[in-house]
Image (cartoon, grey):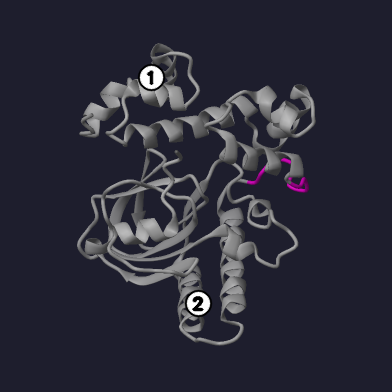
């Protein structure tokens, strides 16, 4: 069973009821930001307007302060840590299926290149640009509370506008990507999608090449050109995320986790995890106070 937490489950965990495919909070305080890690199967955008905290994203710590923002894709693990009492954090959560309804291009988010290097992007901008992003969120709240005939369509358009604005900001902040005029290959995008859907079924590069009806060599060339990484590195990255999530489920033994992740032995899983995380699965559980 995949342990991604869907939108409704995540909000329920935080004692918030929501039946919509999106959720917006414009006044989150320290009391609202639960310190327990959660693994998402939805998209999220958050911007800090006051205070500071440490945000752990996919087991990496980032210092977040005023005008810092995060945009994350499904399969990202997030935890809020060391949250200051004066924190003000605005965030939007939305399901991809809602966003893509009636859109002809299913890869509109991926083509922004926001997630070319992984499943999230964190940046810091200036006061004016931060205010513009907040204004979009304010407008989204206004429209989402109006029970009109085209409310969903308007909300969907505003979210797409927000994503494109964030993409513009991010492209100005991050170093220029090699061969700027290149487009992200549909093969690469399809490869990313297949991994997300099948990582617990198969972790072989050849499996995904066969699924895409291309050679192993061609898949490696495409992925390398699009991301500066190999298919194997991307598979391992997602596999490690799954390992973190499964280790967080204290009802599972390490042996059961190794089996779920398609390793042929506990020792093989242990070697993989220690190489990637610099500690063994059991040491990770001890460090995170996760007792089986």
**Image position, residue 192 (x, y; %):** 63, 40
What residue do we see at 63% from left, 43% from top? 193
The answer to which image quadrant residue 49 occupies is bottom left
Image height check: is 104 above or below 117? below
Is residue 181 one of those drawn in magenta? yes
Instruction: Report whether 160 appears left or right of 272.
Output: right
Residue beneath label 1, please? Answer: 274
Q: Which label sits on residue 184?
A: none
Report the quarter where the N terminus lies.
top left
68 inside magenta stretch: no
Label 1 to label 2: alpha-carbon separation: 44 Å
- Viewport quadrant of the C terminus: top left
Answer yes or no: is residue 277 visible. Answer: no
Label 2 neighbour load within 10 Å: few <14, some 14-19, many 20+: many
- Which residue appears at 44% of the width and 34% of the height? 242
Q: Which mark is residue 140?
A: 2
Give the mark count.
Answer: 2
Asked whether, in this view, residue 77 is left or right of residue 183, the answer is left
> In the figure, residue 150 lies in which quadrant?
bottom right
Q: Quadrant of residue 208?
A: top right
- Asked whether, in this view, residue 168 is left or right of residue 291, the answer is right
Left of 14 or right of it: where is 41?
Answer: right
Residue 35 locus on image (x, y percent)? 26, 50
Residue 271 placed where, x, y %?
41, 15
Q: Nearer the N terminus, badge 1 or badge 2?
A: 2
- Which segment is the magenta one? 176-183
Label 1: which secondary element:
helix
Residue 46 in picture, x, y percent from top left: 43, 61
């Amino acid at each position: 069973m995949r342990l991604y937490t869907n939108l409704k489950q995540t909000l329920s965990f935080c004692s918030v009821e929501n039946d919509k495919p999106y959720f917006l909070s414009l006044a989150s305080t320290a009391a609202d930001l639960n310190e327990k890690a959660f693994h998402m199967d939805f998209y999220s955008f958050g911007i800090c307007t006051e205070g500071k905290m440490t945000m752990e994203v996919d087991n990496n710590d980032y210092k977040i302060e005023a005008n810092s923002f995060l945009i994350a894709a499904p399969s990202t693990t997030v935890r809020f840590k060391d949250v200051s009492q004066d924190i003000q954090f605005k965030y939007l959560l939305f399901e991809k299926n809602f966003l893509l309804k009636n859109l002809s291009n299913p890869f509109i988010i991926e083509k922004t290149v926001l997630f070319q290097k992984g499943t999230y992007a964190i940046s810091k901008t200036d006061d004016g640009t931060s205010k513009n992003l907040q204004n979009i969120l304010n407008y989204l709240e206004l429209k989402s509370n109006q029970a009109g005939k085209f409310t969903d369509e308007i909300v969907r358009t505003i979210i797409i506008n927000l994503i494109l604005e964030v993409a513009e900001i991010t492209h100005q902040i991050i170093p220029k990507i090699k061969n700027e005029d290149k487009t992200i290959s549909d093969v690469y995008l399809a490869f990313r999608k297949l991994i997300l859907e099948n990582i617990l079924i198969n972790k072989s590069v050849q499996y995904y090449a066969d699924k895409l009806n291309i050679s192993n060599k061609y898949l490696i060339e495409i992925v390398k050109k699009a991301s500066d990484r190999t298919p194997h590195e991307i598979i391992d990255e997602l596999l490690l995320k799954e390992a973190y999530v499964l280790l967080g489920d204290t009802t599972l033994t390490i042996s059961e986790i190794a089996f779920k992740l398609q390793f042929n032995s506990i020792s093989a899983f242990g070697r993989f995890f220690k190489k990637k995380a610099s500690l063994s699965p059991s040491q990770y559980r001890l460090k995170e106070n996760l007792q089986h």
